[in-house]
Image: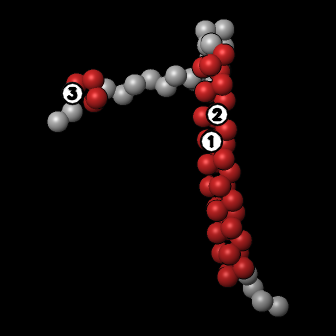
Amino acid sequence: MFSEEDRVAKPPKYEIGQPLEELSVAELEETIGLLQEEIERLSKAMDQKSSHMGAAEALFSKHK
């Protein structure tokens, strides 16, 4: 079973726009790594959606 602590959502370590003075160099490095991974994930999702959109446009475009 899960303890009460496991069920409580933990706040993220970093929130966009938060003051950076409170973060150590190690925390900044960790945050940069996490954000780079997230950018990569978002880029892949965008590429997939663009690819699907192109395929749909090709399928439904009128042939002249």
What separation in Å lies between label 3 and label 2 (alpha carbons)? 30 Å
Q: Report which residue position mark 1 lands on.
A: 37
Residue 24 or residue 14, whichever sits in front = 24
* Residue that numbered label 2 is attached to: 33
- Secondary structure, mark 1, is helix
Q: Residues within 10 Å of mark 3 (few under 14, many from 20)?
A: few
**Residue furthest out toward the right:** 64
Residue 4 position by quadrant: top left
On screen, residue 27 versus residue 2, left or right, reads right
- Residue reaching furthest to the front: 26
- Report if residue 19 is visible in the image: no
Numbered badge on residue 21: none
x%, y% of residue 9?
36, 28
Label 2 SS: helix
Task: Report which quarter residue 37 is drawn in.
Answer: top right
- Residue contact between numbered discs 2 and 1, judged by CB atoms under 8 Å: yes
Q: Is residue 51 visible?
A: yes
For label 3, the residue is 3
What amino acid is found at the position of numbered circle 2 in the picture? Gly
Q: Are marks 3 and 2 in contact (CB under 8 Å)?
A: no
**Place of residue 59 in the rendered image (x, y in percent of width and height, measured from the top left):** 67, 82
Q: Callout 1, which amino acid?
A: Glu
Local packing at callout 1 (Cα closer than 10 Å; few below 14, some 14-19, many 20+) is few
Left or right: 7 as drawn, with respect to 47: left
